[in-house]
Amino acid sequence: MEVLIALAIGLLTATGIYLLLRQRTFAVILGLSFISYAVNVFIFAAGRVQTKAIPIIGTGDVFTDPLPQALVLTAIVISFGMTAVIVIMALGAYLESGHDRVDMVEHEDDR
Amino acid sequence: MSHWIIAPVALPALMAAILVLVLRGNLGFQRAISLAGTLGLAVIAAMLILAASGSGPEVYFLGDWPAPFGIVLVLDRLSALMVLLTAVLALVVLVYAIGADWDKMGRHFHAIYQFQLMGICGAFLTGDAFNLFVFFEVLLIASYGLMLHGGGRDRMRAGFQYVAFNLIGSTLFLFALATIYSVTGTLNMADLAVKLQTLPPGDVALIRVAAVLLLLVFAIKGALVPLHFWLPGAYAHAPGVVAALFAVMTKIGAYAALRFGTLVFPPGLEATATLYRDVLLPAALVTLVVGAVGVLGAVTLPRLAAFAAIASMGMVFVGISAFTPAATSAALYYIVHSTLAGAALFLVSDLAMRRRAHGRLDAVLPPMAQGGLLAALFLVAAIASAGMPPLSGFIGKLLILSAWRDAAWLVWSFILAATFVMLVGLARAGSQLFWKAHDGQARATSHPPEPWAFTAVITLIGLMAGIAVLAGPITAWLDVTAAGLYDPSTYIEANRLYQEP
């Protein structure tokens, strides 16, 4: 179980980093999304991986840690909002300049 | 318990809501409310700094939850100073924005501006590491809006790079926080300070990784080489008035590094020891050089101001990286100075850009309207940025030099050489802007005089002169602040961990 989750986090992060280094905005946004998925799972795993544990209410000996779940909820909401913002910005940049490269073309830079 | 501690977060949030929901059609009312709100923030910040100077750190328990379980805001001398600096800068920059009609160039400028202030003040006040992340996001999302204010192709593209870079930073922040939580089970900064003292040896490696990840995040915020690449493009393409407000945003990285480096990972902690010092000093020195060379090589005026901001962050981090009370006090003085100086340089550069066809320094353009006054202001702003007497930068640099006396050959040579290169770069830019021969008959471009915009710049210069004149009392106050940072017991006690609030 732990190995599977660790592998999943590693794979998501690696994919995300590869896509981040691409030159087109679409790939970069996908990369950011992958990395934010990876970190969400990572935060979740920070509360230790447990099966058949009681969330908050209930009877039993093993309880899960509810705090990482609250943290991950915040992180998901924020990364979702940020992705929406960056998609709009990428669209705006594409529509105004006619290409979706991330880097600046030389003559664009001197305003 | 004083409820005023939350006012720097609550007041801008309230103002922003009023601005965007009630007043969105009426620019005159928006300006009045925004000015009143920012003025109120400055007054509250002044009250808070008086309160913080009188007593030790004071903690505000949100929802009255006891400390490590609920979120706390902590008012100590450092956070009060940073909030006051933010409020004063915001007020001056807002006057400029109104005087130069920047708020007419797009919608909702004032509402986003207030949200920005809310995020910055919150980041300075919070005593909880995850809450710090949340306030970082609040200030970042507002900064995206401000940065794109006015629109335009280049601004959009520079904005995309800025957002992408900061999203990566946010993700690293989350990785670091999750690592810390999985080891210690807490994210309250005072509680972390206690728990890390008794860390099991097996967890040392994890905490060191988390500490470095956090430092990377703060280095991104503080534009420390090699994580500075977002800054020149973003600041040069942002509206000048927004770049001036952003002068305090890079300082958040410095503040957070200082807070974590003294409270959570103090130099005496076994797990991290001198980790922050060892990493920060070389990076800070290189940042200083990159900023100075960038000033010398900048092609356009806004880029010059942006590289001056990078150089100033290098100076600040050189001061912080010593992690001794004297150097920290010097760094705090330089933070106050460089925020004002950086903002002044961005505003002067914006004034010049509004009077020229474009910002290239190597082009011969007709003389600018109000060129004489503008040249004088540029001279003063350049003197302040380079850290020459008689303004406060000189004193700040002297204090940092004096604090680094034991490693003089290395640090002094970097600082003095970088200052010289910056001086040459600024002198070159100024002479090209204002002196370079214009073809004979060219008449000065006409432009409205914008008295309030000039007033704002002159106010910033007056403030710098003020902190230079009052350097004695201010450094005495900062010495106490720095001493408090290296003795965090009162900060931790104020949190009343695991007790009923």
Image (tube, rainbow, N blue to C red):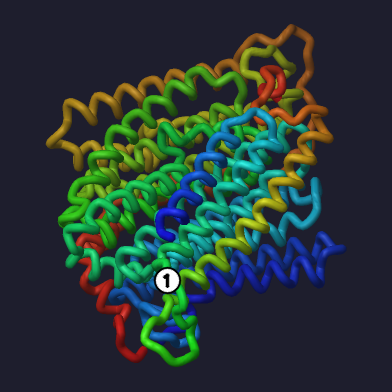
Lateral position of residue B47 relative to residue B411, left or right: right
Lateral position of residue B194 relative to residue B116, left or right: left
Q: Which chain is mark 1 on?
A: A
Query: Measuring 30% from the left and 84% from the top, which residue is drawn there?
Result: B498
Q: Name the residue under label 1.
A: A50
Q: Residue B59's quadrant in the figure? A: bottom left
Q: Where residue B395 sits in the image (x, y, percent)?
A: 31, 41
Q: Residue furthest left?
A: B406
Lateral position of residue B486 relative to residue B55, left or right: left
How many numbered circles does the render carry?
1
Number of other residues with Cα within 10 Å of mark 1, as a class: few under 14, some 14 to 19, many 20 or more: some
Specify the quadrant that holds the C terminus of chain B: bottom left
Q: Residue A102's quadrant in the figure? A: top right
Q: Nearer the viewer, residue B497 or B27?
A: B497
Q: Is residue A50 above or below residue B318?
A: below
Query: Measuring 68% from the left and 70% from the top, which residue is drawn there?
Result: B15
Q: Is residue B371 above or below residue B316?
A: above
Query: Measuring 76% from the left and 47% from the top, which residue is drawn there?
Result: A88
Q: Is residue B83 visible?
A: no
Q: Where residue B297 sits in the image (x, y, percent)?
A: 51, 17
Specify the quadrant that holds the N terminus of chain B: bottom left
Q: In this view, does B492 lie above or below A10?
A: below
Q: Where residue B306 sits in the image (x, y, percent)?
A: 54, 33
Q: Which of B131 and B85 is in front in this view?
A: B131
Q: Is residue A109 visible?
A: yes
Query: Measuring 50% from the left and 35% from the top, which residue is drawn there?
Result: B381
Q: Nearer the viewer, residue B389 or B322?
A: B322
Q: Where residue B36 sits in the image (x, y, percent)?
A: 66, 68
Three-letter code for the amino acid on which mark 1 is drawn: Gln
